Image (cartoon, helix red, strand yellow):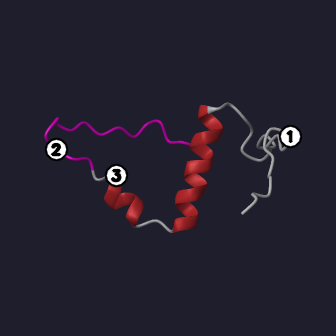
Amino acid sequence: MKMDRTVFDMFKKDEEPNDFKYWQTKTVKARLLAAAYLNSVAYNYDINNPPKVDRTVFSIEKRER
């Protein structure tokens, strides 16, 4: 997936862009893939090799009732 940086729309402050309508036409899977791609760009990691969760930070304890 590659971002097309040539597309840009200008709209007035009181106008609403139709991003919401665009994303509603996409499948849930396509939306999640786009979100994963944007996260990889924002946090600078390879989309095909995301960082692993450090499971030593979290622990599960059984609560007494």
As helix, strand or loop, the secondary structure at mark 1 comes to loop
**Residue designated by label 3:** 19
- Residue 40 figure quarter: top right
C-alpha span from label 2 to label 3: 12 Å
- The image's mark for residue 56 is 1
Q: Residue at x 71, y 44 (%)?
A: 47
- The image's mark for residue 15 is 2
Q: Position of residue 22 (x, y in %)?
A: 37, 59
Residue 2 belongs to the span the image colors magenta: yes
Image: magenta residue range:
1-17
Type of amino acid under label 2: Glu
The answer to whether 58 appears left or right of 25 in the picture is right
Give the quarter of the figure containing the C terminus.
Answer: bottom right
Residue 59 belongs to the span the image colors magenta: no
59 w.r.t. 63: above or below: above
Depth order, front residue of 13/56: 56
As helix, strand or loop, the secondary structure at mark 2 comes to loop
As helix, strand or loop, the secondary structure at mark 3 comes to helix
Residue at far left of view:
14
Type of amino acid under label 1: Thr
Q: Residue at x 57, y 57 (%)?
A: 32
Q: Residues within 10 Å of mark 2 (few under 14, many from 20)?
A: few
Sequence-first disc among 1 and 3: 3
Q: Residue at x 76, y 59 (%)?
A: 64
- The image's mark for residue 13 is none
